[in-house]
Every structure is written in C-alpha cells, then in structure tokens.
Image (cartoon, helix red, strand yellow):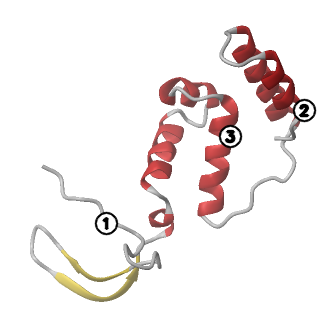
Amino acid sequence: MSEPAVIGKCPICAAQLRVVRLECGSCGTRLEGSFSLGLFHSLSPDQLEFLEVFIRARGNFKDVERELGISYPTVRSRLDAVIRALGYQTDVEPDREATAERRKEILRQLAEGKIGADDAASLLEERP
C-alpha cells in the first residue's frame, strides 16, 4: 500500500504549507528545517490528475478529450486553470486554431444532438 500524498495547503486557512522534517525510509536519516513543497503542490487533486493525463498525452488535446471524456473548450479551460494556479498568465486572446477547434466542437455537439440550435448559436457568439 502506498503512503498518502503530501497536501500543499492548510486544511484550516488554505495557506501554503511548508515541510519541516524529511526522513529517509531506508537508513533513517532525518533533515530538519523549513522546505518549500514546490510549485505543483499548489494544484488541486483534480488539476494534478488533469496534468498527468495531459503529460501522458504529450499535450495532444484530442487524446486528453478522449481519455477524460471532455470537449476541446473544457480541455483548454482546464489547462488555463492549471497555468494560472502555477502563477503564470494565460493568453487573453485565444489563437485562431483554438477558436476554430472550439467552433468545430460546438458544431459537433449540435450535430450529435447534445445541444440545441439556440444554445449552439449562443456559444458561437461568445468570446472564448
């Protein structure tokens, strides 16, 4: 059985936690001090899961869509959320390829009957 993962945020106030002691499971060596958890501990469990899938798919949005059963706009939105959670800015304006992919996804959902014509029209008029 694997050991539980280290949490990155305080369950009481949500502040970033710090590690104060490290111990080697093999020889028992202990280090004490104040260590940061690292950049990825600021991500939620859902964001970490998404990031694992994204890396496994080598950044291929179609493979991420398939594995998670989500649409292209959702993949993009989740990736943007991970980028922001890591402290980076995301593009304000989506690129042309992303806009074209979003339009294709909306039209695919319309063709499959997952959304109605009015919903599709509204989604196509929205800015991503």
Indicate the amino acid at tag 1: Val
Nearest to the observer: residue 33 or residue 42? 42
Residue name at image x 68 percent, y 40 percent: 76
- Relative horizontal placement of residue 98, taking residue 26 as reference (left or right): right
Q: CA distance from mark 1 to mark 3?
A: 27 Å
Q: In the picture shown, does residue 91 fall above or below 99?
A: below
What residue occupies the far left of the structure in this picture?
A: 27
Indicate the amino acid at tag 3: Arg
Residue annotated with mark 3: 76
Q: Is tag 2's residue or tag 1's residue first in the polypeptide sequence? A: 1
The dot on residue 17 is none
Tell me the element at label 3. helix
Residue annotated with mark 2: 125
Residue annotated with mark 1: 6
**Circle 2 residues within 10 Å: few <14, some 14–19, many ≥20:** few
Residue name at image x 44 percent, y 45 percent: 49
Q: Which quadrant would residue 87 be assigned to in this image?
A: bottom right
